[in-house]
Image (cartoon, rainbow, N blue to C red):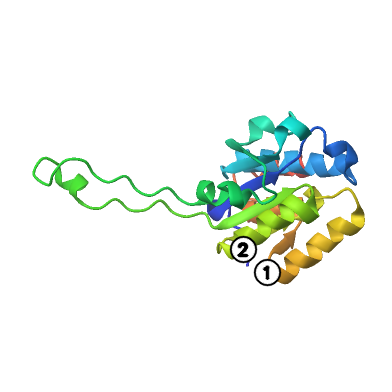
């Protein structure tokens, strides 16, 4: 199964100023997180971020902030425990106001629910703690979870790799930033192809 930009949402987990200096391969990981945010903006994929204990670990990296619609501050390791899944679910349609006689006919029909975007593309730090727990909870909540491995890390390589093994075993798809980019595009005739190519090169 391939990713579909129209069915996707992006979640960037805890790329925080005081945490990143301790992260294995932090520079490459942060660069790919920014690329994911830029791709999401270019291809109209909703993007969200989380910050773990921001008073202790600081805010997310400044270059990520303008690339997301909302940032969830949390104290639990899993962002799902603090309401992330509600952010990712399609909003319920608004009920028509008034009574049947006072409404025009086109408003008397029940509104259709907004289309759900069930493919969650997720990346972050630390891979074996907040990223892992959030992704596992999203899988349990019946989202399809795609973990962007080259935009994830931990303080140690061993912890990062253990997280990937566990996530794959739980049913998450393991992908890279370029895989996300080209699956969201699907072909070279996409109007954003050249801009996406410039981002991944």
Above or below for 146 versus 70: below
The earlier-in-sequence mark between 2 and 1 is 2
| Location of the N terminus (image quadrant) | bottom right
Residue 45, how many percent across, how many down? 58, 45
Q: Which residue is mark 2?
A: 139
Looking at the image, residue 139 sits to the left or right of residue 6; the answer is: right
What's the residue at 53%, 49% (across, down)? 88
Q: Nearer the viewer, residue 112 or 138?
A: 138
Residues at discs 2 and 1 in contact (Cβ within 8 Å): yes
Looking at the image, residue 7 sits to the left or right of residue 175; the answer is: left
What is the secondary structure assignment of the residue under circle 2? Answer: helix
Crowdedness near tag 2: few (<14), some (14–19) or many (≥20) residues, C-alpha within 10 Å? some
Residue 78, how many percent across, how many down? 66, 51
> Mark 2 and mark 1: span between their CA atoms?
8 Å
Residue 61, how many percent across, how many down? 76, 32
Q: Nearer the viewer, residue 126 or 11?
A: 126
Numbered mark located on residue 15 in the image: none
Looking at the image, residue 42 sits to the left or right of residue 56; the answer is: left
| Location of the C terminus (image quadrant) | top right
Numbered mark located on residue 171 in the image: 1
What's the residue at 61%, 42% (across, down)? 48
């Amino acid at each position: 199964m391939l990713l579909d930009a129209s069915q996707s949402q992006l979640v960037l987990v805890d790329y925080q100023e005081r945490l990143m200096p301790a992260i294995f391969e932090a520079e490459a990981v942060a660069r790919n997180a920014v690329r994911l945010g830029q791709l999401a903006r270019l291809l109209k994929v909703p993007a969200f971020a989380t910050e773990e204990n921001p008073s202790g670990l600081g805010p997310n990296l400044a270059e990520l902030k303008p690339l997301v619609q909302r940032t969830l501050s949390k104290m639990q390791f899993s962002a799902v425990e603090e309401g992330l899944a509600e952010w990712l679910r399609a909003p319920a349609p608004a009920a028509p106001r008034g009574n049947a006689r006072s409404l025009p006919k086109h408003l008397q029909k029940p509104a259709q629910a907004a289309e759900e975007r069930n493919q969650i593309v997720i990346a972050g730090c630390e891979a074996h703690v907040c990223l892992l727990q959030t992704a596992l909870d999203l899988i349990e909540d019946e989202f399809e979870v795609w973990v962007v491995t080259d935009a994830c890390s931990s303080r140690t390589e061993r912890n990062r790799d253990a997280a990937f093994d566990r996530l794959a075993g739980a049913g998450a798809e393991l992908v890279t930033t370029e895989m996300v980019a080209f699956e969201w595009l699907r072909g070279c005739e996409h109007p954003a192809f050249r801009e996406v190519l410039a981002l991944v090169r």
